[in-house]
Image (cartoon, grey):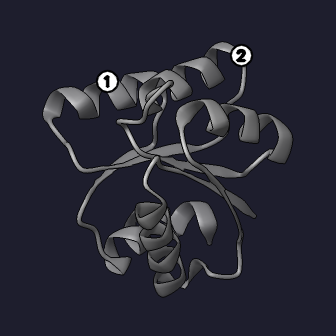
């Protein structure tokens, strides 16, 4: 499987990738995008099996990315990894088609719990 990690922080992308490995998902192909616009292009070119996106990114936010993908008919499984979390954000994410919203800081256990059924 191929996983797209989209975050405007290179360091945070590396932390997410390291945590994926710690959670036992290191055998999957991982591609990166540094903002929502780049992530949208990467979904088209790389066809990932899962998108893990930050919420707040310049140019195109994570929720705008999700909405653009769904409006274009793309149903790739999508989840948020973000520093902010509220009931309103969780509802917006869910209504937009996101499968989960993981709040930073996170652990390998949280990744296993949220991603285990998707990544096996």
Quadrant that contains the N terminus = bottom right
Please say if 75 is above or below 4.
above
Question: Residue placed farthest to the right in the image?
Answer: 45
Residue closest to the eye, 34 or 119: 34
Q: Residue at 71% of width from left, 27% of height from top?
A: 74
Q: Residue at 49% of width from left, 29% of height from top?
A: 97
Q: Determine whether the residue tagged by mark 1 lies in a helix, strand or loop.
A: helix
Query: Would you name the residue on which mark 2 appears?
Result: 72
Compared across the picture, whether 51 is left or right of 54 comes to right
Rendering coords of residue 114 (x, y %): 41, 62
Rendering coords of residue 36 (x, y %): 55, 33
Q: Residue at 72% of width from left, 19% of height from top?
A: 73
Compared across the picture, whether 51 is left or right of 55 comes to right
Query: Would you name the residue on which mark 1 appears?
Result: 92
Q: Determine whether the residue tagged by mark 2 lies in a helix, strand or loop.
A: loop
Contact check, label 1 and label 2, Cβ < 8 Å: no
Q: Quadrant of residue 41?
A: top right
Could you give the CA–CA distance between mark 1 and mark 2, rounded to whole angstroms? 18 Å
């Amino acid at each position: 499987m191929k996983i797209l990690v989209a975050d405007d922080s290179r360091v945070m992308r590396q932390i997410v990738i390291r945590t994926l490995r710690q959670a036992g998902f290191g055998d999957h192909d991982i591609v990166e995008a540094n903002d929502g616009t780049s992530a949208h292009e990467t979904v088209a070119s790389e066809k990932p099996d899962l998108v893990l996106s930050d919420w707040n990114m310049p140019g195109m936010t994570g929720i705008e990315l999700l909405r653009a993908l769904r409006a274009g008919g793309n149903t790739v499984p999508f989840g948020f990894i973000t520093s902010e979390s509220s009931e309103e954000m969780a509802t917006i994410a869910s209504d937009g088609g996101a499968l989960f919203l993981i709040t930073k800081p996170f652990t390998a256990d949280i990744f296993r719990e949220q991603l285990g059924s998707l990544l096996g």
